[in-house]
Image: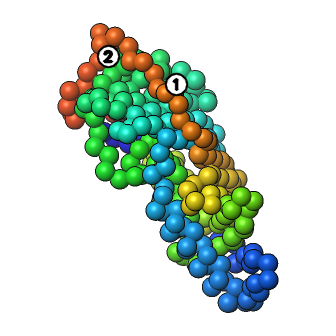
């Protein structure tokens, strides 16, 4: 099944750095100059490696993703909420446009059910004869392969791309054993990591100089190395074009059985029996034929 994506044209079938500094523990001297950069780089790498081991593996949780992207007069704003619970797991992702509230897509994978289900809003009425469709259950073999976490994975990938360019980062200790990582991600790294996937008509407006501009980014990691939140926020004017973006992902708490809907009567569900039917459905959702 195609992963959930959002572009500026439709809700589709859905990832330098600041001068190095850090906080040493009381009684511990922090080296100056290049040694300080090395110390902070090592701390950053350790935190990111630990996060990589847990990202997408937090169970029985809920998440929310507020995603806004604007280029000149074209913009999209979506809220994505998700829940996962149980062993085997039930998972649901709800993706709704703020700009057009009747444009939404809810993807539901019930535990032990051989099928996945998608509920679509009235804006997509031409994609299927009913508001619900079913399809063969997707085989998700990687922890970032679920719609409820994939955006966070793209965002951390953008940070890693930026860090690999110049090995600079800001780290900060927060109450409760949390760690905050601050990075200046280039717009190029943001786009290359697919945090937003733009149609070619819009991506062609972003020239080389604009791609070098900075998207300030913060990641907060819990004491147990799990993700707490990621925020990317920027306004960029360059080459006669304006880009504005806000991407905010949070792990919001514990999931509940109430997060998962009852399925409608089978007569109200359109079955999509194979890959060809599934692909045709998603093409219609994304504005294709």
Residue 84 image position (x, y, % from top left): 46, 38
> From the image, which quarter does the C terminus lie in?
top left
What residue appears at the point 32 percent right and 16 percent down from the top-left corner?
269
The residue positioned 25% from the left and 30% from the top of the image is: 114
Question: Residue 66 in the image: x percent, y percent?
Answer: 61, 41
Q: How many labels does the image show?
A: 2
Relative horizontal placement of residue 187, taking residue 144 as reference (left or right): right
Residue at 34% across, 32% down: 111
Q: Can residue 81 be seen in this view?
A: yes
Between 273 and 124, the one lying in front of the other is 273
Q: Give me the residue at 56% from left, 61% from top.
A: 225
Which tag, 1 or 2, sits closer to the chain's start?
1
In the displayed structure, 133 sits above or below 95; it is: above
Examine the rendered structure and indicate whether residue 155 appears above or below residue 199.
below
In percent of width and height, residue 2 lies at 34, 41
The CA span between labels 1 and 2 is 21 Å
Label 2: how many Cα within 10 Å (few below 14, some 14–19, many 20+): some
Q: Mark 2 points at which residue?
A: 269
Residue 85 vs 259, above or below: the answer is below
* 191, 178: nearer the viewer: 178
Quadrant the N terminus occupies = top left
Asked if labels 2 and 1 touch by Cβ distance under 8 angstroms, the answer is: no
In terms of secondary structure, where does tag 2 sit?
strand
Q: Mark 1 points at which residue?
A: 258
């Amino acid at each position: 099944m195609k992963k959930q994506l959002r572009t500026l044209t439709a809700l589709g079938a859905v990832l330098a750095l600041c001068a190095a500094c850090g906080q040493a523990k009381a009684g511990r001297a922090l080296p100056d100059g290049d040694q300080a950069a090395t110390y902070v780089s090592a701390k950053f790498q350790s935190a990111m490696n630990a996060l990589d081991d847990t990202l997408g593996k937090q169970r029985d949780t809920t998440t929310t993703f507020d995603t806004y992207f604007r280029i000149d007069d074209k913009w999209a704003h979506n809220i994505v909420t998700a829940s996962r619970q149980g062993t085997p797991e039930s998972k649901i992702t709800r993706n709704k446009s703020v700009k057009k509230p009747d444009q939404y897509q809810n993807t539901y994978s019930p535990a032990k059910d051989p099928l996945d289900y998608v509920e679509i809003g009235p804006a997509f009425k031409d994609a299927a004869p009913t508001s619900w469709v079913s399809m063969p259950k997707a085989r998700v073999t990687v922890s970032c392969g679920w719609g409820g976490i994939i955006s966070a994975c793209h965002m951390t990938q953008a940070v890693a791309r930026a860090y690999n360019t110049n090995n600079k980062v800001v780290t900060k200790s927060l109450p409760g054993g949390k760690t905050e990582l601050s990075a200046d991600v280039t717009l190029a790294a943001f786009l290359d990591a697919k945090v937003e996937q733009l149609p070619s008509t819009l991506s062609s407006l972003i020239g080389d100089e604009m791609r070098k501009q900075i998207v300030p980014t913060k990641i907060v990691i819990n004491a147990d190395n799990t993700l707490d939140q990621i925020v990317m926020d920027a306004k960029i004017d360059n080459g006669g074009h304006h880009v504005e973006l806000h991407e905010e992902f949070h792990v919001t708490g514990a999931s509940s059985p109430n997060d998962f809907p009852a399925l409608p009567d089978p007569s109200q569900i359109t079955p999509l029996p194979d890959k060809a039917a599934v692909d045709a459905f998603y093409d219609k959702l994304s504005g294709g034929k």
